[in-house]
Image (cartoon, rainbow, N blue to C red):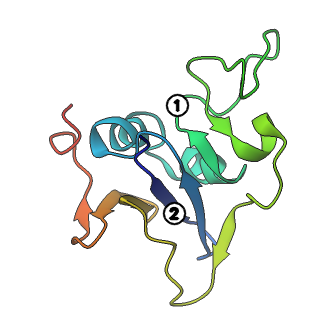
């Protein structure tokens, strides 16, 4: 069974870009990966540019000398619905003013300096190494 999440990033031009992630959304997995590999504004922004994720992994771009697709993924590379499965309608959502991202089991937000996590129905907290089991 999957643990769904959203990942939302506030960009330098004050937009909020949001994507859905299907697998392993709990803080000990997706939270830990976000803290370890996407903890600066540029990489966080790049992460959400490809749209919805099947699985969050430490790298965005695959090694071009090896195959990478949904059925044959490189183990350390994100799996995107559009890029790696050829699906449509799974693009990054740009949220307007007070519009909230869809709410999933866990919801991650990067404000340009810090990651936050909000479990469904819970309160938003700063994402910490301790919370992620690191």
The quarter holding residue 122 reads bottom left
Residue at point 61%, 33% (across, down):
78
Question: As drawn, which residue projects farthest toward the bottom?
Answer: 98
Q: Can you say whether 63 is above or below 53 in the image?
A: above
Q: Is residue 6 left or right of residue 124?
A: right
Q: Quadrant of residue 99?
A: bottom right
Q: Is residue 27 left or right of residue 40?
A: left
Element type where label 1 sits in the image: loop
* Crowd around label 2: few <14 · some 14–19 · many ≥20 (10 Å): many
Badges 1 and 2: C-beta atoms under 8 Å apart? no
Mark 1 nearby-residue class (10 Å; few <14, some 14–19, many ≥20): some
Q: Secondary structure at mark 2?
A: strand
Q: In front: 40, or 37?
A: 37
Tell me: 122 left or right of 36.
Answer: left
Query: Mark 2 highlights which residue?
Result: 8
Q: Work out whether 96 lies above or below 6.
A: below
Q: Where is residue 125? Give x, y as percent.
A: 22, 64
Work out whether mark 1 precedes mark 2 in sequence or the reverse, and give the earlier one.
2
Q: Which residue is mark 1?
A: 57
**Residue 100 image position (x, y, % from top left):** 49, 80
Whole-percent x, y for residue 36 in the image: 38, 34
The Cα atoms of the two marked residues, 1 and 2, are separated by 16 Å
Residue most extreme to the top? 65
Q: How many marks?
A: 2
Depth check, front residue: 94 or 72: 72
- The image quadrant where one finds the N terminus is top left
Q: Residue 105 at x, y = what percent? A: 36, 59
Q: Nearer the viewer, residue 63 or 114?
A: 63
* Residue found at x 58% / y 64%: 18
User: Residue at position x 61%, y 45% from top?
Assistant: 53
């Amino acid at each position: 069974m999957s643990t769904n999440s959203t990942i939302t990033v506030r960009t330098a031009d004050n937009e909020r870009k949001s994507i859905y992630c299907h697998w392993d959304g709990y803080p000990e997995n997706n939270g830990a990966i976000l803290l370890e590999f996407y903890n600066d504004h540029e990489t966080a922004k790049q992460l959400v540019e490809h749209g919805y994720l099947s699985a969050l992994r430490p790298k965005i771009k695959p090694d071009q000398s090896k195959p990478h697709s949904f059925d044959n993924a490189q183990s350390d590379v994100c799996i995107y619905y559009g890029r790696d499965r050829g699906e449509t309608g799974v693009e990054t959502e740009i949220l307007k003013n007070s519009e909230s991202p869809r709410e999933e089991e866990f919801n991650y937000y990067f404000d340009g300096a810090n990651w936050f996590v909000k479990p469904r129905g819970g309160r938003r907290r700063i994402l910490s190494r301790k919370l992620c089991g690191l």
